[in-house]
Image (spheres, rainbow, N blue to C red):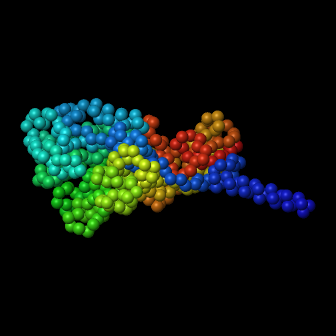
């Protein structure tokens, strides 16, 4: 009898250990009707997760992981009359980037040194005043010819608002587009005409452009170059608008220095714009461009002798994406490793920390807990999907009511849903979690979790269960 009791106790310990392994690692098949908890282990999110990371120019950077590509477009290429548009150049840009399974960021401009004017031809022919001058604010490139239009001309102002309205009507929510930078005003569409500040658009014109963008775009994020409060000398107030910002001198003129002459630096301008601007990252994305002077040295062992701390710039700005050409050149293995770590530090990083399941007949109640380890939320409204898959391919699916754009850094959300498995035959199922990309062929959002035996590409395998 004593021997039998010892055998029974040993058997119980083995069973409990097996169940614990299934609970902890999501690898074991657990009998139906038993509540089960899966705790997937952490692993860094991929460097080409969607809607974040480094952004090369369209068609470049193919040797480095990325999910976004950028390019400029002159307004003259798409606007042929006051309300007449030829969208073919923009369609070609968006389709070309989408064919590489990436989403687009683009900026439409009127003036760009070294390039022909971006002002629509019909406006030039009608006599819109144009100033031709040599722009010396082009470092590290040499000075170049620029063409600045009269931004106060009513015909140009009407053209800008008409264009924005038509652009939003056609493209707001288009899955090929990740973000739009407002553009249109100033050199490179960067909302300045330095050093000819008196040639730049008045606050009235700036307000017209911003209001047009807000009215036209409800889903696709639009980003402005400069934060501005009510007392800003050059820019119309924008701190209360539902628009993000892009810092185009990132890690060069980003961090506050305390010097009066550096008041235009991004974080200094953000602070001057007020609390609403400082909190803008919570609801609208922050992008930018790594300053070109840093491209040759940023990932080298020695680093850059000029510029500002990159990691601190990311933390304090909560940046999600950065235009970058430093990774378009061949990188040494250690340089590539540093660059990929920098990419991962941008934007969101979502880990599934726990999934709990409980049976109710042929219905499975599932709660999922997600933690954001990143510096920003995921701003899009992509649904989180739960799927049960049979080995033969049958499946059942449900949407979890997550609001990922409200999942701020260092916070956690738990949401629950019920999977109806009545149409699945009894037997083993795999429980999967995924966030598909609405862009056909685009990379899904992948969690910061290890998945030793993925069942479907882009879906996190939580574990196995048995349907009664």
Residue displayed at 38% across by 58% down: 302
Q: Left or right of 356: which side holds 86?
A: left
Regarding residue 419, the answer to whether it shows in the image is: no
Quadrant housing the N terminus: bottom right
Quadrant housing the C terminus: top right
Image x and y of residue 209, in percent = 21, 47
Image x and y of residue 229, in percent = 23, 60
Relative vertical location of residue 294 with respect to residue 440 in this rendering, above or below: below
Residue displayed at 30% across by 60% down: 306
Q: Left or right of 320: which side holds 115?
A: left
Front one among 238 and 201: 201
Image x and y of residue 205, in percent = 16, 49
Relative vertical location of residue 122 with respect to residue 428 in this rendering, above or below: above
Image x and y of residue 215, in percent = 27, 46
Residue displayed at 62% across by 43% down: 430
Residue displayed at 85% across by 58% down: 7
Q: Residue furthest bottom?
A: 258
């Amino acid at each position: 009898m004593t021997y039998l009791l010892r055998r029974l106790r040993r058997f119980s310990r083995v069973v409990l250990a097996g169940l614990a392994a299934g609970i902890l690692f999501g690898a074991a098949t657990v009998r139906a009707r038993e509540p089960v908890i899966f705790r997937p282990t952490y692993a860094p999110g991929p460097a080409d997760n969607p809607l974040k990371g480094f952004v090369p120019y369209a068609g470049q950077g193919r040797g480095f992981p990325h999910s976004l590509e950028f390019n400029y477009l002159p307004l003259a290429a798409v606007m042929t009359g006051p309300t007449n548009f030829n969208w073919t150049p923009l369609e070609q840009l968006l389709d070309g980037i989408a064919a590489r399974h990436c989403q687009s960021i683009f900026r439409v401009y009127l003036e760009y040194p070294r390039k022909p004017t971006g002002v629509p031809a019909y406006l030039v022919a009608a006599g819109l005043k144009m100033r031709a001058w040599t722009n010396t604010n082009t470092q590290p490139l040499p000075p170049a010819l620029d063409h600045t239009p009269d931004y106060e001309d009513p015909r140009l102002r009407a053209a800008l608002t008409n264009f924005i309205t038509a652009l939003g009507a056609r493209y707001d929510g288009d899955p090929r587009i990740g973000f739009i930078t407002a553009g249109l005003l100033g050199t490179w569409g960067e909302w300045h005409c330095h050093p000819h500040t008196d040639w730049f658009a008045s606050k009235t014109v700036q307000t017209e452009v911003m209001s047009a963008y807000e009215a036209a775009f409800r889903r696709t994020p639009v980003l402005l170059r400069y934060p501005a409060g009510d007392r800003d000398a050059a820019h119309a107030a924008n701190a209360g608008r539902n628009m993000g910002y892009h810092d185009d001198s990132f890690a060069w003129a980003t961090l506050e220095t305390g010097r009066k002459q550096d008041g235009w630096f991004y974080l200094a301008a953000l602070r001057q714009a007020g609390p609403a601007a400082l909190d803008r990252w919570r609801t609208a994305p922050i992008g930018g461009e790594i300053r070109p002077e840093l491209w040759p040295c940023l990932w080298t062992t020695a680093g850059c002798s000029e510029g500002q701390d990159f990691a601190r710039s990311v933390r304090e700005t909560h940046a999600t994406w950065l235009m970058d050409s430093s990774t378009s050149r061949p990188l040494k293995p250690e340089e590539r490793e540093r660059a990929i770590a920098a990419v991962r530090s941008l934007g969101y990083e979502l880990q599934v920390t726990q999934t709990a399941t409980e049976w109710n007949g042929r219905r499975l109640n599932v709660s999922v807990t997600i933690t954001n380890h990143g510096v920003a939320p995921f701003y899009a409204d992509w649904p989180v999907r739960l799927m049960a898959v049979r080995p033969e391919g049958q499946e059942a699916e449900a949407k979890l009511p997550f609001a990922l754009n409200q999942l701020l850094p260092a916070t956690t959300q738990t949401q629950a849903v019920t999977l109806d498995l009545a149409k699945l035959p009894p037997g083993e199922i795999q429980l999967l979690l995924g966030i598909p990309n609405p862009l056909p062929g685009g990379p899904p959002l992948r969690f910061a979790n290890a998945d030793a035996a993925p069942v479907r590409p882009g879906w996190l395998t939580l574990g196995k269960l048995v349907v009664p």
